[in-house]
Amino acid sequence: MRGGRKFCSGNGNTFVILKVLIDIESLEAGYHAPSGKQIVVKIDRLNIAQGEHTLLLGPSGSGKTTLLNVLSGLVLPLNGKVNIDGVSIGVLSHAQRDKFRSQKIGLVMQRLHLISALNVEDNLLLTQRLAGMPRDVKRIKEVLAALQIADKAQKFPRSLSQGEAQRVAIARAVLNRPNLVLADELTSALDDSNCDIAIDLLFAQAREHGATLIVATHDARIKSRFARVHDLGAAA
Amino acid sequence: MNSFVTALGLAWAYLRQRPLATLLNIVLLGLGVGTIIALILTLAQAEERMGRDSAGIDLVIGAKGSPLQLILSSVFQMDVPTGNVPLTEAARIIATPQVKLAIPLALGDSYKTFRIVGTEASYADLYSATLQEGSLWTKPFEAVVGAETARLTGLKLGQNFAGSHGLGEGGDAHADHPYRVVGILRPTESVVDRLILTSVESIWAVHNDAGESGKAKTRADKPKNEHDERHHQDDGKHSHKHHGEDTLDEHNHSAENEITAYLIQYTTPLAAASFPRMVNESSSMQSASPAIEISRLFALLGIGVTTLKIFAAIMMVCAALGIFIGLVNTLNERREDLALLRLLGATPATVFLTVALQGLALGLLGVILGLVLGHLGAEWMGYAMQKTHRMQLTGWVFFKEEAVVIGAAATLAVSAALIPAWRAYRNAVPETLNSA
């Protein structure tokens, strides 16, 4: 039964049946170079259940970002298969992958890319619009309020502090209620206390929206916060 | 459609992000477009006006000199006349079956720079001029005033005024021979609007009594073919006495009346083949064709106009270059933005449009500014020239040539954006985001 492997977790008599969210099999990912395929990351098998927040740990160059790019459908795997929420990324067309990503996956990039010409609210409206979601200002206010930056709605990215910008990026990642939130080096540029705050916010938002978090980092500080750690450095 | 609106909103946001650069591009394009539009308006109206003023006139005969000057002075009432010719000789020439209509013109006097033209009712008919009030002249010293003349001088029906010698301001007034306004013409959008019409006899009477032997003064003031002398007369500062002395030797034998020019209409187009030659060879007069002289005039003007048009075109190309450089520069800054757009679900086409629409928006705004500048400029020139110039110019007309300029400017702006837009389209998303 594809994607039907059940996880059982919980304690005592309570059983929660968890669905497989990510199913990776004999994956080879990398890029096409003039000399041929360059394989950066190789994974024989990786299953991540819904709600199973996972840390992808590894030093620079271990393929964390490449794996995230594959998961978000930005690049196609060189070999193997990747299923997300039962959908095989490899068989989708370019446009289908773009749509899938914009609706099902929230992304928090290492550098908190916001559209520089738009204010916070317009950035979030654009996120709804590009994903083909209905315009929903109430939802935007709600998410901003949850992240305690409701008063920044009319501010332009330039005038935001790094912490504020990071919250906006998190707000954008969860705005369309994705199943999966991918974060790349979320905390590596932050000091300890801001690092904790960012992770707390991300966990809180993921819990609230029922999203599964996958965070790629070389930052060992946050290792303890995750139930599951996949060490790419060890796997490679 | 949805992605178009998204791209348009983004393009606008990006333009607003760099207001000064945006303004510079728009102003540069606007100036180029505006210059060309103003040129088109001026030339087209001049051509239209000249066509109207010379309609129905196949040939002009008058004193020898520059044919262009003869046409300018007698058809468009712009230059000083080439001189006068004896009435009897002119009468001999026009007494041929080839001439259907010959309208006499006696020039040389003015009132507050508005020319007094001694002529016949057929001159008013030539421009389909009809009376607003009053009647046409029937006796000497009755005058009919053109619409613009009446508006600008304030002359009213029944009012008396004295003509002054010469066509410029400050000529000696013929105070002993006042004219009386008997009629005011409706606007005709032609040269008649800025004239004062009277009988040929009035002009003769003024100058005969002034001791000039029936010469409208022009000829004496201005020796034939001596262009240097023209301004001399135009400023109208010559006194009659001086004038009389100049022409003393002619004074005795030229007791007969003189005429400045005749506007001729042929009975048959075939007359064009023989009649002008006959005039030039068998009389002391010359003939000039309005059609030929107008095209000669525009050929002369053409060099200046072409220079201005090239200058304006260079401005437009610079504007397009500015748009191109601006977009390429910002493209580098906005690489991450564009990649992020793709990440959020925008198609490459939307990203392409976001950049291309910036070019289009700059182009359209530049064109709109150019249209406003060009038309306001033409209107302003028309207003400034209203007193001095014999041509009415307005900014409130549109010509189809303008559409060509608009199209060219918009195309230029969009093509300037195409290469940056294509680069945005091809922007590799993962590489851009990961090269952080």
Image: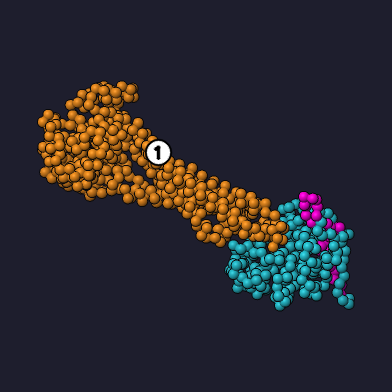
Report the residue at 15% width, 39% height from top: B243
Q: Identify which residue, B76 or A172, lies in the foreground.
A: B76
Report the residue at 35% width, 45% height from top: B393
Relative to B230, say whether A32 is above or below. Answer: below
Mark 1 is surrounded, within 10 Å at the Cα level, by few (under 14), some (14 to 19) or many (20 or more) other residues, namely few
Report the residue at 17% width, 43% height from top: B238
**Residue A15 covered by magenta stretch:** yes
Percent coordinates x, y for residue A84 in the rendering: 80, 60
Relative to B305, say whether B269 is above or below. Answer: above
Q: What residue type is labelled 1?
A: Gly
Percent coordinates x, y for residue B11 in the rendering: 58, 56
Relative to B121, say whether A191 is above or below. Answer: below
Do we see residue B202 in this rendering?
no
A229 to the left or right of B287 = right
**Residue A59 covered by magenta stretch:** no
What chain is tagged by disc 1? B
**Tag 1 secondary structure:** helix
- The residue beneath circle 1 is B302
A99 to the left or right of B138 = right
Q: Identify which residue, B335 or A209, lies in the foreground.
A: B335
Percent coordinates x, y for residue B297 in the rendering: 35, 36
B182 to the left or right of B316 = left
Quadrant of the image containing the C terminus of chain B: bottom right
Chain B painted colour: orange
Report the residue at 67% width, 71% height from top: A167
Chain A painted colour: cyan
Quadrant of residue A40 within the rendered picture? bottom right
- Main secondary-structure element of the magenta-colored stretch: strand
A76 to the left or right of A120 = right
Segment colored magenta = A14-38
Q: How is the image coloured?
A: by chain
